[in-house]
């Protein structure tokens, strides 16, 4: 049985309005909480503290501030061989079936669990680094029957983003990397979440606030669709 004080509180117009707002907002809070996802960043630079690492750290910090789970993998610290093109992986369409015994299979097992995958690399000779390229080639084991009606991929529906850095401009320098990345989503059956190129890089200490703002805006963009 409610006391007189409890009845007065329940009939208070202000309390009633607040309770109504809470009932409206709570479902949206639940939805937001459910949208916090796993994100993996593939750090392709051989340098652990270079320009790419610095800019990527700003992206990761912003994603973490949004509540997402972010894991960064420095590929230069891993043993990743090139693809042998043996085709054995195609015999196991339900899992990464690569037969090589290096660090790549574990990384591949991990990245297929991510909702958002970030490829980060400096531009080396109009391409991604050897460290990142080796792993990209090994994702050949993550899909089967490309160009066929029954084409399927373990990365289907995953959002993928590209962060690239370089000492020069975008033109006549970075375009091939972004063209290749744009095509990568077809065999992966993934979604291009966004791309960012930061040029005219020298040293991490010279990366200014404008670059940081661009990195933060990039993080918000690529997380916006997941």
Image: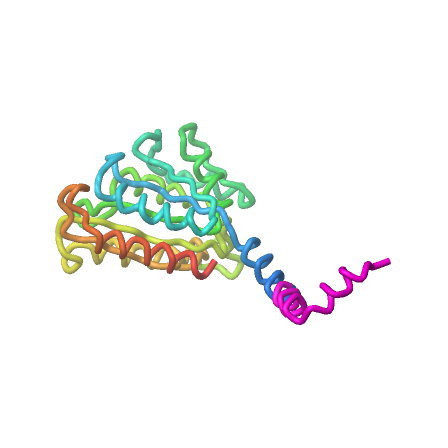
Residue 174: x, y in percent? 20, 55
Residue 116: x, y in percent? 44, 51
Q: What residue appears at the point 30 percent right and 33 percent down from the top-left corner?
A: 76
Between residue 183 and residue 5, name the one nearer to us.
5
Quadrant placement of the N terminus? bottom right
Between residue 207 and residue 139, name the one nearer to us.
207
Q: Which residues are magenta?
A: 1-22
- Lateral position of residue 128 relative to residue 9, left or right: left
Residue 94 to residue 106: above or below: below
* Whether residue 22 is visible: yes
Q: What residue appears at the point 45 percent right and 43 percent down from the top-left corner?
A: 111
Between residue 22 and residue 161, name the one nearer to us.
22
Give the residue at the far right of this rendering.
Answer: 1
* Whether residue 144 is visible: no
The chief SS type of the magenta part is: helix
Residue 105 to residue 165: above or below: above
Taking the magenta stretch, the answer to whether it contains residue 62 is no
Q: Look at the image and name its color scheme.
A: rainbow
Residue 151 to residue 18: above or below: above
Residue 197: x, y in percent? 24, 55
- Lateral position of residue 93 relative to residue 194, left or right: right
Badge count? 0
Q: What residue appears at the point 35 percent right and 30 percent down from the top-left corner?
A: 78
Give the residue at the far front of this rendering.
Answer: 4
Between residue 6 and residue 140, name the one nearer to us.
6
The image quadrant that residue 18 belongs to is bottom right
Q: What residue appears at the point 33 percent right and 36 percent down from the top-left corner?
A: 75
């Amino acid at each position: 049985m409610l006391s007189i004080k409890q009845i007065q509180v329940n009939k208070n117009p202000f309390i009633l309005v607040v309770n109504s707002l809470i009932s409206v907002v709570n479902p949206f809070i639940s939805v937001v909480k459910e949208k916090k996802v796993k994100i993996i960043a593939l750090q392709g630079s051989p340098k652990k503290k270079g320009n790419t690492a610095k800019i990527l750290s700003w992206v990761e910090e912003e994603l973490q501030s949004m509540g997402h789970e972010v894991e960064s993998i420095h590929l230069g610290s891993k043993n990743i061989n090139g693809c042998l093109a043996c085709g054995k992986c195609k015999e196991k369409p339900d899992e990464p079936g690569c037969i090589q015994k290096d660090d790549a299979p574990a990384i591949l097992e991990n990245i297929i669990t991510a909702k958002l995958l970030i490829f980060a690399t400096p531009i080396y000779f109009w391409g991604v680094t050897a460290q990142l390229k080796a792993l990209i080639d090994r994702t050949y084991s993550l899909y089967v029957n490309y160009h066929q009606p029954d084409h399927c991929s373990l990365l289907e529906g995953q959002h993928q983003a590209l962060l690239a850095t370089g000492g020069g401009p975008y033109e006549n320098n970075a375009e091939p990397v972004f063209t290749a990345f744009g095509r990568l989503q077809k065999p992966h059956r993934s979604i291009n979440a966004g791309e960012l190129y930061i040029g005219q890089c020298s040293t991490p200490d010279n990366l200014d606030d404008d670059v940081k703002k661009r990195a933060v805006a990039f993080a918000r963009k690529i997380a916006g669709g997941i």
